[in-house]
Amino acid sequence: MAKHKNNHTPTKIRFSWNDPFIRGIIYQVIIIGLLAFGVWYLVSNTLHNLAVRNISTGFDFLNREAGFGIGEMSIDYQPSDTYGRAIVVGLINTLKVSVIGIVLATILGTLLGIARLSSNWLVKKVAAVYVEVMRNVPLLLQLFFWYALIIESLPRPKDAYMPLPGVFMSNRGLQVPTLEGNAWSWIVGGLAIAIVLSVLFAHWARKRQEQTGSMPPVLRVSGLLIVIVPALLLWISGEGLHLSFPELRGLNFRGGTSLSPEFAALLLGLVVYTSAFIAEVVRSGIQAVSKGQWEAAESIGLSRSLTLRLVILPQSLRVIIPPMTSQYLNLTKNSSLAVAIGYPDIVSVVNTTLNQTGQAIEGILIIMAAYLTVSLSISVFMNWYNRRLALVER
């Protein structure tokens, strides 16, 4: 048998400037080299200037005593605690106003977006005026307005309004009764378990609907789980809770919990401002659904509200979610304006820290890392949710 000769010769790589592949690699190497040189120059120059001025670097200052108080906190903190704990308090304050603001802005913005498409002329025009005014007034001015309004329009603590028993409104904020005790960890754990069970039940209900056509009562079951599971764990733990009412003692209130004017003004400003942008996102998402969907739903006897809730909004979410993510990120980053009205968020706390320690670069890096982590977390969650809503092509 004749042997077949292997005529395949290895291809030689020709390095030619006319080759776009080779030219692209050279351009990328040059750009990466320039970026690396720029970073090296900035870091080395900064370290040299700090050494000349005898300014220490590093994050060892986080373990030193802070020595300053924080007016509003969700965890225990004393001036004798470390700078690290003070920054954690500021970060929790930022997360608190951001999470509450996202929830309230979403609700208000959705209602406004639907109102802009209302067949009622008055509702439609009022919503349009609200959106146009709030979108075009800078957020910082709105924060100053709400803060001044709260401080100037409310009386001193001794003359505080009492709209409900045990609830006081004054220029020191809103004082309301609160539950105190050692059972909060059990309640929070019960809520977490109930949320997980609700998600699993909703997943099972969706599968069952695909198989049988009948939809189990997801909202009803989820509501019962959220009430029953924490109550059951509270009963098993044997821990107690007692209701603490605010009382006027001297020049201020003691007991209960307080919503400070700074927190109220910041939350109100963020919600009012962001909801105007969310309203436009919701309006455009609803209008992206074809008119035939409305007509098909009406042809089977669905009312306009049921059509909107069961047919239009679920389809419009695929259009709404991506720009809604940007609005959530904007609200979180805009919370840094809290320093202008004295709310102790992470920016305010770190500013005080770097003024006392001189660790300006480290302080800025901490703020950047905090906002970057929070923003990426929001983006990851919203992208995951967007992928679940995406249509799967076959």
Image (cartoon, rainbow, N blue to C red):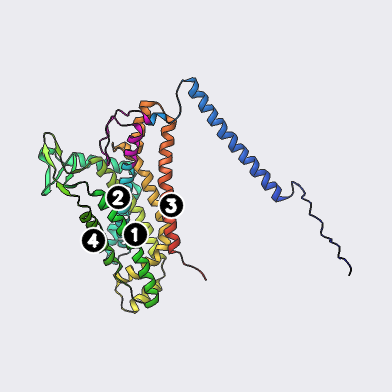
Mark 3 is surrounded, within 10 Å at the Cα level, by few (under 14), some (14 to 19) or many (20 or more) other residues, namely some
Corner quadrant of residue 116:
bottom left
Element on which disc 4 rests:
helix
Magenta span of residues: 63-91
- For badge 2, the amino acid type reads Ile
Secondary structure character of the magenta stretch overall: loop
Quarter of the picture containing the N terminus is bottom right
Identify which residue is drawn at 33% across, 53% down: 276
Element on which disc 2 rests:
helix
The answer to which of marks 4 and 2 sits earlier in the sequence is: 2
Which one is closest to the eye, mark 2 or mark 1? 1
Mark 2, residue position: 100
- For badge 3, the amino acid type reads Ser
The answer to which of marks 4 and 3 sits earlier in the sequence is: 4
Q: Are marks 2 and 3 in contact (CB under 8 Å)?
A: no
The answer to which of marks 3 and 1 sits earlier in the sequence is: 1
Label 4 and label 3: CA atoms lie apart by 32 Å
The answer to which of marks 2 and 1 sits earlier in the sequence is: 2
Mark 4, residue position: 228
Q: Are marks 1 and 4 in contact (CB under 8 Å)?
A: no
Which one is closest to the eye, mark 3 or mark 1? 1
Residue 230 at least partly seen: yes
Element on which disc 3 rests:
helix
